[in-house]
Amino acid sequence: MKTTVRPMVARDKPTIMDMLRAIREFTSEEVAVAEELIDAYLEDASSSGYLVFVAEVNSVVTGYVCYGPTPLTKGTWDVYWVAVDPGGQGQGVGRALMAFAEGKIKESQGRLVIVETSGRPDYDKTRRFYTSLGYKVAARIVGFYSPGDDKLILEKHLAQTRGAKRPFARS
Ligand SMILES: CC(C)(COP(=O)(O)OP(=O)(O)OC[C@H]1O[C@@H](n2cnc3c(N)ncnc32)[C@H](O)[C@@H]1OP(=O)(O)O)[C@@H](O)C(=O)NCCC(=O)NCCS
């Protein structure tokens, strides 16, 4: 299995939208918000504040990641969405997307990555995914999304590498 990661382009959008709609964990409202971020990126990548990359497995678009620098911070970045087609999950595609995003963030002198996720039981697998990548629970807001549905804020401090580009660059 050959996985490659490349910037998202407009012709990827139907595949990504089909994938988002097929993921049981996502509500239609969440899919709509994910689409807004994708559209902002496709319309004007440099001013949107978002970066979107897709993973291709054997040339088929199978997942995507959307992340960006957190406004008003120095070196903190948010991963807003990462998703893999249900048929392609559990085969390392999500890990490859996160490794790619973290590598790009480090190149831009990013030092801290934040992910928000749900505490609901159906997000157990997602939490295990982030834990396996070194993310730690920084905070839990009880009942944030709805009664009984907590928000978990996960953090990962990135080790700096030599040869990083501009300090706190935005892309
Ligand atoms: C969460 C998600 C992005 C992970 O992507 P993936 O390609 O399925 O995950 P990977 O195969 O790269 O797994 C990486 C690690 O996560 C953990 N993991 C993934 N799936 C798992 C499962 N079903 N059970 C337990 N651990 C799991 C493992 O530790 C795995 O490490 P390993 O490969 O060394 O065993 C993907 O499953 C997904 O899209 N889920 C639904 C949407 C979602 O919850 N997105 C995140 C919130 S925005």
Image: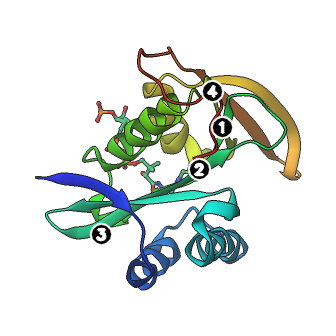
Task: Describe residue 3's horizontal placement relative to residue 10 as left or right.
Answer: left
Q: Quadrant of residue 41?
A: bottom right
Eyeballing the image, is 151 above or below 136? below
Q: Is mark 1 within 8 Å of ligand 1?
A: no
* Discs 1, 2 touching: Cβ within 8 Å: yes
Provide the residue designation for mark 2.
Answer: 67
The amino acid sitting under disc 3 is Val
- Front residue of 92/146: it is 92
Q: Nearer the viewer, residue 120 or 4?
A: 4
Residue at 54 percent across and 20 percent down: it is 158
Give the CA separation, mark 4 to mark 1: 13 Å
Q: Is residue 96 left or right of residue 158?
A: left
Amino acid under label 4? Answer: Pro
Which residue corresponds to mark 1? 77
Indicate the amino acid at tag 1: Trp
Callout 1: SS: strand
Q: CA distance from mark 1 to mark 2?
A: 7 Å
Q: Mark 3 = which residue?
A: 61
Q: Callout 2, which amino acid?
A: Tyr
Task: State the mark number for residue 143.
Answer: none
- Number of dots carrying numbers: 4
Residue drawn at x 49%, y 68% is 23
Q: Callout 1 environment at 10 Å: few (<14), some (14 to 19), or many (20+)? A: many
Give the answer, above or below, for where 168 lies relative to 21. above
Q: Nearer the viewer, mark 4 or mark 2?
A: 4
Mark 1 vs 2, N-terminal side:
2
The answer to which of marks 3 and 1 sits earlier in the sequence is 3
